[in-house]
Amino acid sequence: MSAIERIRQRRAELIARAAHQRDDIATALRVLRAPLAVADKGVAAVAYVKNHPGIAAAALVATAVISPRRTLRWAQRAIIVWRGIRWAQSSTRAAAARLGKADRSA
């Protein structure tokens, strides 16, 4: 068998192996299809609200008029979540800064 034939055979084996690996990955990731679809819808909803703030404001006002207590409860929850996100961001930035300083000093 010549060197070129060995290379061609090796190439064919690698192509078959890659195809098999792609199939394995696709099978493993099939489980994530539904959760990712939900996440995509959430991202699309956020983008829609960003692009149409008037509609979001009107819905918020309507909800506040119809059930003010529920709106206040949700506002309190939103503030708690927002503060938690801000805390997590600042903590992450501080930790990253400390790690960056530690890397430079080593």
Image (cartoon, helix red, strand yellow):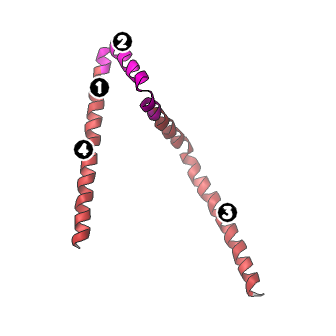
106 to the left or right of 20? left
Disc marking residue 40: none
> Given contact means CB atoms under 8 Å apart, are the residues at marks 3 and 1 in contact?
no
> What secondary structure is marked by label 4?
helix
Q: Which mark is residue 75?
A: 1
Count residues near mark 3 (Cα–Cα under 10 Å), then give few for <14, some for 14-19, many for 20+.
few
Which comes before the other along the chain, label 4 or label 3?
Answer: 3
Label 4 sits on residue? 87
Q: Nearer the viewer, residue 90 or 12?
A: 90
Q: Quadrant of residue 23?
A: bottom right
For marks 4 and 1 on the same chain, the one whose residue lies earlier in the sequence: 1
Circle 2 residue:
66
Q: Quadrant of the N terminus?
A: bottom right
Q: Give the residue at x 29% y 41%.
A: 85
Q: Is residue 20 left or right of residue 96?
A: right
Residue span colored magenta: 46-71
Return the disc, 4 or 2, that comes first in the chain's sequence: 2
Rendered residue at 63%/60% (across/down): 22
The amino acid beneath tag 4 is Trp
Callout 1 amino acid = Ala
SS label for mark 3? helix
The one of 61 and 6 positioned closer to us in this rendering: 61
Q: Earlier in the sequence, mark 2 or mark 1?
A: 2
Which of the two discs, 4 and 3, sits closer to the camera?
4
